[in-house]
C-alpha cells in the first residue's frame, strides 16, 4: 500500500512547539493562527481561519498555535498581540496580520504570499 505523503486536511490543525517545524514545511505554503482560549478577538477570527482551511487545504497547511501553551514559538516570532496570523512560504515567515480581520483580508494576504 502506498503511503500518502501530504494528505489534504480541510480544517485547522493544532500546532505545538514539537510539531511546528514539520508543519510549516509540510506544504509550500502555511498559515498559523496564534491564539489563546481567553482571547475574544481570537474567537471572532476562528471561523474565517476554518473557512480558509476548507477552501485552501489542498495547497496550504492551516494551523492554530495556542500561545499560552507554546510560549517559545510566540517569543521566537515576537508575538505581542493576538490573534496574530503568520504566513509562511517554503518554511520561512514572509508576512503576518495582527488582529481580528475579515476573511477577505486573510485571503488577500494569502494570495499575495502564494504569488
Image (cartoon, helix red, strand yellow):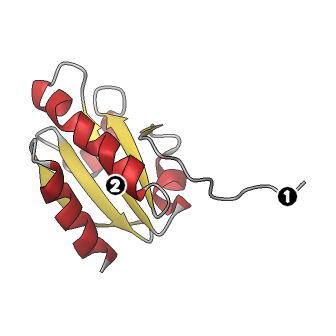
Q: Earlier in the sequence, mark 2 or mark 1?
A: 1
In the shown orientation, is residue 108 left or right of residue 21? Answer: left
Residue situated in front as seen by the camera: 109 or 22: 109
Q: Residue furthest top?
A: 38
Question: How far across and how far down the image is residue 58, in percent?
Answer: 50, 60
Question: How far across and how far down the image is residue 50, in percent?
Answer: 33, 41
Other-residue count near label 2 (Cα within 10 Å), few / some / many at <14 / 14–19 / ≥20: many
Name which residue lies at 46% across and 48% down: 20
Quadrant holding the C terminus: bottom left
* Residue 95 in sight here: no
Q: Is residue 18 above or below residue 96?
A: above
Q: Is residue 88 above or below residue 86?
A: below
* Numbered disc in front, either 2 or 1: 1
Name which residue lies at 17% across and 50% down: 103
Name which residue lies at 85% across and 58% down: 2
* Residue 50 in sight here: yes
**Count of numbered badges drawn on the protein:** 2
Question: How far across and how far down the image is residue 47, in percent?
Answer: 25, 36
Residue 2 got which mark? 1
In the shown orientation, is residue 98 left or right of residue 7? Answer: left
Quadrant holding the N terminus: bottom right
Name which residue lies at 39% across and 48% down: 53
Q: Which residue is mark 2?
A: 31
* Distance from the alpha carbon under mark 2 to that under mark 1: 28 Å
Element on which disc 1 rests: loop
Question: How far across and how far down the image is residue 49, in percent?
Answer: 28, 44
Residue situated in front as seen by the camera: 79 or 5: 5
Amino acid at each position: 500500500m502506498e503511503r500518502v505523503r501530504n494528505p489534504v486536511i480541510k480544517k485547522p490543525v493544532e500546532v505545538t512547539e514539537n510539531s511546528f517545524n514539520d508543519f510549516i514545511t509540510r506544504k509550500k505554503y502555511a498559515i498559523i493562527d496564534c491564539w489563546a482560549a481567553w482571547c475574544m478577538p481570537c474567537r471572532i477570527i476562528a471561523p474565517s481561519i476554518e473557512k480558509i482551511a476548507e477552501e485552501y487545504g489542498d495547497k496550504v497547511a492551516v494551523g492554530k498555535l495556542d500561545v499560552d501553551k507554546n510560549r517559545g514559538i510566540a517569543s521566537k516570532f515576537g508575538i505581542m498581540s493576538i490573534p496574530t496570523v503568520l504566513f509562511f512560504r517554503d518554511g520561512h515567515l514572509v508576512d503576518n496580520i495582527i488582529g481580528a480581520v475579515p476573511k477577505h483580508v486573510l485571503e488577500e494576504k494569502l494570495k499575495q504570499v502564494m504569488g
